[in-house]
Amino acid sequence: MIDTSRYVGQKLGGVINRFMADEYRLSDIDATRFAGRKLGGVINKLLDDSPSKDLGIKMVTPFTLVLVALLGLAAVVGAYRLVFGIGAASNLNDLWPWGLWIGFDVLGGVAMAAGAFLIAAAVYILNWKKYKCIARASILNAFFGYLLAAISITLDIGRSFVIWHPLVMWQINSVMFIVALHLVLYLTTLGTESSPMVFEKLGWHRALHFVSRIMVGAVMFGVALSLLHQSSLGANYLIVPEKLSPLWYSHLLPYHFLVSAVMLGLAIVSFETLLTGKVFNHEPPREVVEGLARGVLIIGAVYLVMKIVHLVTGPGIGAALDGSFLANLYLIEMTVGVILPLALLSRRSVRTNLERIFVVDIMVILGVLMNRMDIGVFGVSEYATRSGGDYFPSYMEFTLTAGMIAFAILGFKFCAKYLPLFPESHQ
Amino acid sequence: MAISRRGFLKGVAGSGGLLLVSGVPLAQARMSTELPPQAVGLLYDATLCIGCKSCMVNCKAQNSVPGGALYKKGMKAPPYDSKGPKGYEGIWDAPQELTGKTLSIIKVYKNGTAEKKDTAINGYSFFKQQCLHCISPACVSVCPAGAFRKDPVNGSVYYLAERCIGCRYCQLACPFGVPRYEWDSAWPEVRKCQLCRHRYADGKYAACAEFCPTGATIFGKVVDLRNEARYRLTLKPGTEYDFPLKTVDSEEKSRRPVAGYVDGVYGLAEAGGTQNIMLSGVSFELLGFRKRIPHFDLPSLTWAYIKKVLWVFAGVFVGGTSLYAFTHRQEKEAGHD
Amino acid sequence: MSTSDALDSICRSLGGISRRDFLKFCSVMAVGMGLPLSAGARIAGAVANPRRPPVIWLSFQECTGCVESLLRSNHPSLEHLILDLISLDYSETLSAAAGRQAEEAKAKSIQENKGKFVLVVDGAIPTRDNGIYCKVAGRTALDILNETAPHAAAIVAMGSCASWGGVAASGPNPTGAKGVPEIVANRTVVTIPGCPPNPYNLLSTILYYVSFNKLPELDPQGRPKFAFSRLIHENCERRPHFDAGRFAEQFGDGLHRKGGCLYKLGCKGPETYANCPTVLFGDTGAGTWPVGVGHPCFGCAEKGVGFSTPLHQLATLKELTPPVFFGEAFPNKPGVSPGIKTFAAGTAGVVVGVAGGAMLTGLGAKKGSGLDHPHGQDEKDARDKEE
C-alpha cells in the first residue's frame, strides 16, 4: 500500500491510508460534526453500512480504483466536450450525426434497464411473490442504466444546458419528444420505486407508508412508460426507411425493440442476480433465476419469430445470408443473441444449471446490445457510404462511454454497500 | 396494500376520460400534407446552370444580415469555410459540401471524360444542393423542442435557434441530407436554407434566384413553378424558348435552345412533395436522389406510432387494474375490504 | 545569278532605269511603309533575288482588316517577313503595282511556282448568281479561287470571312457568301478565324509550314490547335470572377468598373474557341483584348456564334470538363466505408469473442459447482472443511 501521508501530510494522509486499507469506513465519520444535528443524522444513517455487512463488499479494490480512474477521465472528457464542442471531442460529422454515444450509451443503456418494469410488474401487479427478493436490485440496476443514458444524451446533444427544452416546448409529432418526456418521468418513477430502501434505512416510516400506498400506481405508470420508451427508441428510426438497411427497417420496428428489450431485461436481471452472487457473499435465489431463464426462452422465441416474419415479408431470408457486410453483422447479432441462447435454453440441463444460465445471459446481453449498435450506428452505413460519409469514434468517445459504464457499476456497488438491497441479507 | 376499490375505479375512469378528451387536440396537432395557400419555392433547371456559383456567393452575403439564416450577432462578414489571407477570406472560400456556414452549394456530376454538358455518359451536369422545403417536412416533425417550423402561409421551413437542443435528429431524419451542424461551436446551431424569408417583407425574394444570370434558379409561387416546369418538359429539345430570369413571372427573359430533360420534375411527390422542384438533363439518381425515398410524407410513418401513445397508457391502467384486482382477490377476501 | 546581275536584269526589264534610281525608289517605298531608310537596300535585294517561299494573297469579300492586322505584327515585323522570310508575290493591299501589272505578276508567279506557293485567302466568296457579287479584274472571286487553289502547295483562310463566311455571311446572306473550305472541298484548308485574328496566328502557321514543310496540327474545322483548341473561357483572366459569381450587370456599374466577369452582358467566351486572352492584340501590354477593356467577347471567331447570336444573349457552355474544385454531387461509393467497417468488425469481434469465451468456460460447468449448488451447501462445505 502506498503511504499517502508522504504526499498530502500527516493528518490527511493518515485518514486516506486507513481508508484504503479498509480500516476506516465512511460509516465511521460522524457527519453531525460538519452538517448539524438533523442533516448530519440523515447522512450518518445513509452511510451506515451494517445492512450489507454479510455481503463482504470492499469498496477499495483494484477493480474499483480502475473504475474511479475511468470515471475521472470521463469527467475530463465531458468537460472538454462542453467547452470545445462536439466536433472537438468526437468524430461525428454531418453524414454521421449519431454514433457511439447514441448507439451504445443511449439505446443500449435504456435497453439494459428494461428489467425493472418487468420485475416490478411481476411483484406488484401479478403478485408473483418469489421475485420480490430481486426487485430492489433490479430497480436500482435500471436506475443506473437510465442515469447512464440520461447523462450520455445530455453530453451528446450540442446544447447540453437546455436539455430541459422538450419538457416545456412540446412538439408531439416527435418521437424524441416522447422519449425525453418519458425518460424524465420514468427516472422519477424509478426514484419512487427505489425510495422504500432509502426510507427504510433512514427510518422515515411515514414516508415509507405513503410510498407503499402509491406503489401500485407508480408501478403501472412505470410499465406504461417503459413500454412506450422502449418501443419509441425503435420508433425513432421509423422515419428513415430509405437510410436504414431493410434487414432491420420495418414498420414494426418499435415492437422489435420492445420485445428485444424485454428479453434483454430478463437476461440482465438474471445476470446481475448471478453476478452479485459471485462477487458479493450472497446466495442467488435458484427458483428466481430459473424462472427468469424460462422467461428469456419464451420471449426469445417470440422475438425470433418476429424477426423471421420480418425477413420473409421484407427483404427475404436470402438478404441475411448473402454474405454482405451488413448481412454478416445481422447474422452475428441473431446467432449470438437469439439463436444460440434459445438452442441452449431449450435443454433442461442448461435451464436448471445456474452457471450455464449465466453464460446464456451474457450472450443475450451481447446480442441485443449489438442489435442496438446495428440499428443505431451500422445499419445506415451503406446509405451514408454512398454519400461519401465515414465514422469511427474518437478516443474521447470511447473514454466517455467507458466512464459511463464505470459510473453505473460503481454506483451500483456503492448502493449495494449502503442500502438494504438484498432483503434476506439482513434477516 | 390498501386501496379502496371505489377510489381506484374512479381513478381509472377519470384518467380514461382525460385521455379521450386530450385526443381531440392531438388530431389537430398532426402535420399537414397540403401545400400552404401562398406557398413559394424555387425551380432549379440544371440544364441552364453554368456553375458560376453566383447563387452561393450571394446566398452567404444576403443571409449574413439580421434575420438571415447565417446571422450571428456582431458578425462583420459572412462566414467562410476556407481560411484565406486576413481580410480576403471570402475570395478563397471554396466549400465542397453543405456545412454550418454554407446553405446552398453547386456540385457537379462527372462521368468519364466529362465533355458534354447534361449528359450521363462522358458528360457532366451541375446540381444545386439545398433544402427542398418539403410540404410535410421530416425535420419539423422530429424536432423534440419544435425548433424547426413550417410557415403556415408561405411554407418556408425555418429554424428557431433559441429552442434547439442540438440533438441532430433532424440530420438523421431528412431524406435529402440537408441540415448541417456547427460541429466546432460550443453553442452550435443547425443550418439550412430558409428561402430568404427575411427578405420578403422588403418585397425581395430568394437571393439565389435574384442573382442567377441564366435563370437556372427562379423563384415564385409553387403552383406557377410547377406549371412552368411541366411546360418545359413538353418542349422539343432544340427549340428556342424564352426562359424567365429571377422569378417565374419576370419580364426579363433569356432566349436559348431547350435541352433534353430526363426523369421529369423532381419534387412533385418525393417525400410527399417539396416546394423546391428541379429539372435535369441527367437522371436524378446520379445526382444523389435515392430511389428509396418514399413518395409519401415521412412524418406519417411516425404518426402511426405516436397516435397509439395515449392508448397504451389507458390500456396499461385499465389492464393493470383488472390484473391487480384479480391477483390480489384472495388477499382482499382475507384482509379488509 | 548574283545579286548585282539580278539587279541589272531588273533595271533592264524596268525600261532601263539606272541601278541608283532603282535603289532610290526602293528607299522611298521603304519610307512609305514606315521602315528605316536602310531597308531600301534590302527591298532591292529581295526584289532581285527572290529565293524565299512564294505567297499569293487573294482578297475577296473582305474589309482589309486581316491585312491591317498583319501590318501590326512586330515579330516578325512586316518588312522582315516580306523581305527576308517570304516572297509576297501578290497582295491587292500591299502591292506597289496595280492593275494589269499586278495581275500579270500574279499569273507569272503562279506559273513559275506551280505546286510550291502558299495561297492565303481573306474575305468570303459569294456564290449566288454564279458569284458575280465580287469580281476582281473582271473575273468572279469564285473562278479565281477555283483556278488558283489547285496549284497551291498549302491553302490558308485568313479571318472569319474566309474561314466560314464571317460578317459577309451573316443573315440573310444575300450574296450567298461562303468560306474557303466550303468552296475548295477536296483539299485541307487551314482556317484562322477571327475578326480580325491576331496576326501571329497566321504568321506562325505560314512560317511553320515554310520551315517544316508541313502544316501544324489542325482540328476538324481546319483550325490550328495551338491557337484554337481552348475556349476563351478557359484562359480568360476574369474567370475567377465567373467562378465566384461576380458579374457586371450593366456597363459602368460597380463590378464592371472593378473588372467583374462580363457573362451577364453577353460574353461569348464560354462558346468561342480562340487564344485572344493569351496572345492579346497589338503587343501593347496586358488587357488589350475586348474582355480586357471591358466589352464582352462576341465570338467573332466561332461559326454559329459571331455575327449570328445576338450580342447580349447569354452564352452556353461548350464542351468543357468542369474544374476540380466543385464538390462531387454523389460519390456513390459502394459497400461500407473503412472507419465504420473497422468499428463494426471490432464490435462484432468483441461480441463473438466474449460470447465464445463465456461458452467455452461456462457451459462445461458441472451441476453442483460454482454458482450452481443447492441452498445451504456453502455452510455444509465450510463445516466439512473445518472437520
Image (tube, rainbow, N blue to C red):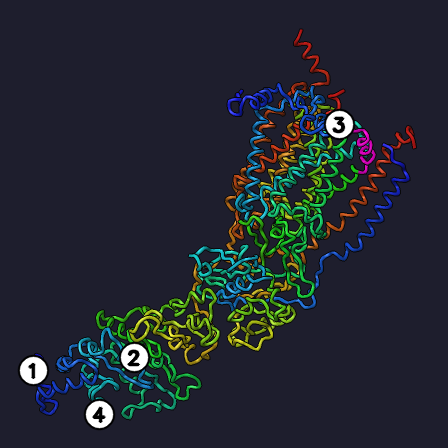
Residue B59, compared with residue A69, is above or below; it is below
Closer to the camera in the image, A116 or C182: A116
**Is residue A261 found left or right of B91 in the rendered image?**
right
Foreground: disc 2 or disc 3: 3
Foreground: disc 1 or disc 3: 3
Q: Position of residue A380 (x, y in %)?
A: 59, 48
**In contact (CB < 8 Å): disc 2 and disc 4:** no
- 1 and 2 marks on the same chain: yes
Q: Position of residue B307 (x, y in %)?
A: 75, 51
Closer to the camera in the image, A312 or C54: C54
Residue A243, compared with residue C74, is above or below; it is above
Q: Which mark is residue A202?
A: 3
| Residue range corresponding to the magenta coloring | A201-217
Which residue, given by chain and number where applicable, does mark 2 sit on?
C69
Q: How crowded is the residue under tag 4: few (<14 C-alpha within 10 Å), some, or many (20+)?
A: few
Look at label 3 and name its amino acid.
Leu
Q: Decide if residue C218 is in sight here.
A: yes
**Cα distance, mark 3 to mark 4?**
132 Å
Q: Which mark is residue C5?
A: 1
Look at label 2 and name its amino acid.
Ser
Q: Describe the element under mark 3 as helix, strand or loop.
A: helix
Closer to the camera in the image, A288 or A249: A288
Name the chain letter of the residue that bears numbered label 3: A
Q: Decide which of tag 1 and tag 2 comes sooner along the chain.
A: 1
Q: Decide which of tag 4 and tag 1 comes sooner along the chain.
A: 1
Look at label 4 and name its amino acid.
Arg
Which residue, given by chain and number where applicable, does mark 4 sit on?
C100
Q: How crowded is the residue under tag 2: few (<14 C-alpha within 10 Å), some, or many (20+)?
A: some
Name the chain letter of the residue that bears numbered label 1: C
- 2 and 3 marks on the same chain: no
**Cα distance, mark 1 to mark 2?**
36 Å
**Cα distance, mark 2 to mark 4?**
27 Å
